[in-house]
Image (cartoon, rainbow, N blue to C red):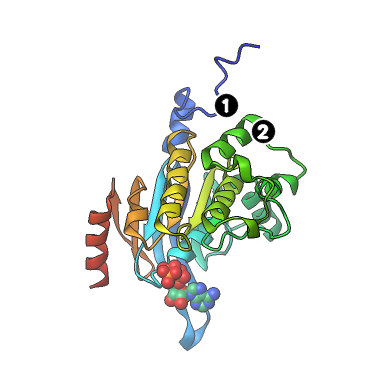
Amino acid sequence: MDTSSRNPFPAVPADADAAAAAAAPAARAVDAVKVYGRGDTAVRALDGLSVDVPARRFTAVMGPSGSGKSTLMHCLAGLDTLTSGEAFIGDLALGGLSDQQLTVLRRERLGFVFQAFNLLPTLTAKENITLPLALVGRDPDPDWYATVIDVVGLGDRLGHRPSELSGGQQQRVAVARALVSRPEVVFADEPTGNLDSRSGAEVLGFLRRAVDEFGQTVVMVTHDPIAAGYADEVLFLADGRLVDRIPEPDAEKVLDRMKHLEA
Ligand SMILES: Nc1ncnc2c1ncn2[C@@H]1O[C@H](COP(=O)(O)OP(=O)(O)OP(=O)(O)O)[C@@H](O)[C@H]1O
């Protein structure tokens, strides 16, 4: 079989339709309002925020503590619902979906990486990675699975349980698990928060490669200007609103902007 023309992971859209799809936002919030609680204790975590998250890009979300970063991510990812306004994954509005439909959306179209790794302790690394697919009775695409394992460098650790892996290795398992179903969007909430700087840099490097080489979309909440420097763009939130976007960020630019926001 001639496999030379078969690239299952095109980094560049092959035709005009794909190019148009790449230009469309992968996720979107429109006039998003999220209020927690009621009456005197109500907190307006998102205050009429609108934002597009571009497809096939690495977007970081930053802002002071309590500015609404995690709330935005959770509402975009169908983990929480808005009080008013609308969140979209691609063209799909999440507001009208049932809990079951949201579960299917998360399972079929999204990937997640959390600060706390969230691996199942009794499963091996390989079983953790393939769990999202196993839950729906699917086997991973062998080429893609091999690529993901190669990228995260876990080949010799696949039989280990999380307790037998370092924090950096556990987060690599979590990144592989997020990528294995080739989701439309990978949401990462402080993915380097529990890692030393070297392991953190590795994880960020994998997320960067997932975007550059495999055309994935990554949205990452972070407090770390160095981590944000891996992104194509940084969105800054303050008081539940989008207050700035910095394209092609580096740590210095991000730090400078943070100082102004926190002042
Ligand atoms: N489940 C909840 N119930 C009540 N208030 C909440 C809840 N979750 C978040 N909040 C409040 O909403 C606001 C935004 O919280 P959010 O966690 O989105 O901010 P953040 O920018 O991610 O903060 P941090 O950087 O500290 O993680 C905060 O004032 C927070 O206390």
Q: Residue at x 55, y 52 (%)?
A: 169
- Label 1: element kind: loop
Q: Which mark is residue 30?
A: none
| Residue holding disc 1 | 8
Q: Residue at x 37, y 54 (%)?
A: 227
Extreme residue toward the top, this view: 2
The image quadrant that residue 162 belongs to is: bottom right
Sooner in the amino-acid sequence: mark 1 or mark 2: 1
Q: Is residue 259 above or below residue 198?
A: below
Q: Residue at x 47, y 49 (%)?
A: 203
Amino acid at dot 1: Pro
The image quadrant that residue 138 belongs to is: top right
In-image side of 52 versus 10 (left or right): left
- Label 2: element kind: loop
Nearer the observer, 189 or 88: 189
Residues at marks 1 and 2, CA–CA distance in whole angstroms: 10 Å
| Residue holding disc 2 | 141
Q: Is residue 201 visible?
A: yes
Q: Is residue 46 visible?
A: no
Packing grade of label 2 (10 A; few <14, some 14-19, many >=20) is few
Nearer the observer, 122 or 227: 122
In the rendered view of the protein, which quadrant contains the N terminus?
Answer: top right
Q: Residue at x 50, y 65 (%)?
A: 84
The x, y position of residue 249, in whole percent, is: 28, 49
Q: How many marks?
A: 2
Extreme residue toward the bottom, this view: 40
The answer to the question of whether label 1 and label 2 lie on touching residues, with beta carbons closer than 8 A, is: yes
In-image side of 140 versus 229 (left or right): right
The x, y position of residue 194, in whole percent, is: 48, 63
Would the CB of label 2 be found within 8 Å of ligand 1?
Answer: no
Packing grade of label 1 (10 A; few <14, some 14-19, many >=20) is few
